[in-house]
Amino acid sequence: MKHVLASPAFSSQEKVGVLTALSGRLGCPPTVNGFFAQLVKKNRAGFIPEIADAFALLADQAKGARQVTVASAAVLSPAEQESLRSRLRDLLHTDVDLSFQTEPRLLSGLRIRIGSTVIDSTVGSRLTAMRALLTKE
């Protein structure tokens, strides 16, 4: 889709057709097709990912929740996930929408991303920091 939207080889009508077909498959309301047509007309279709992120942020603000991504070396048990959700809800004073990722290269610990803030307590990041400190001297 990115190729079609960025390529001058495709006409505006073809680009709108691709976006309309996609919105139809996703079950979007008809106003989305008009929005996509305006984006193509104003040559802003390349900003769709950023627009989607901005709308997601507004939707989260409207429902009073924060998006939080938690990465760990191993899969967290449901009890650990619920404990983390509860602790983050208390710290942030708002509801949290958690998504969990498993990244074995982290070795141990957690990396928590809340918007643009990253809290990294992983062994991998500590080893990297130690390596940088030792090679600096």
Image (spheres, rainbow, N blue to C red):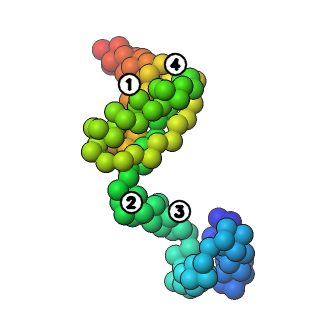
Residue at 51 percent of width and 19 percent of height: 107
Residue at 31 percent of width and 48 percent of height: 94
Name the disc covering residue 121, or none: 1
Q: Amino acid at mark 1?
A: Ser
Name the disc covering residue 49, or none: 3
Q: Amino acid at mark 3?
A: Pro
User: Which circle's residue, 4 or 2, is located before the other in the chain?
Assistant: 2
- In the image, 89 versus 104, the foreground residue is 89
Disc 4 vs disc 2: which is toward the camera? 2
* Residue 25 drawn above or below residue 35: above
- Residue 38 drawn at (x, y percent): 54, 84
**Label 1: how many residues lie within 10 Å, few (<14), some (14-19) or many (20+)?**
some
- Asked whether residue 78 appears in the rendered view, the answer is yes
Measured Cα–Cα span from mark 4 to mark 2 = 35 Å
| Residue 137 location, quadrant | top left
Secondary structure of the residue carrying numbered label 3: helix
Location of mark 4 (residue): 107
Measured Cα–Cα span from mark 1 to mark 3 = 29 Å
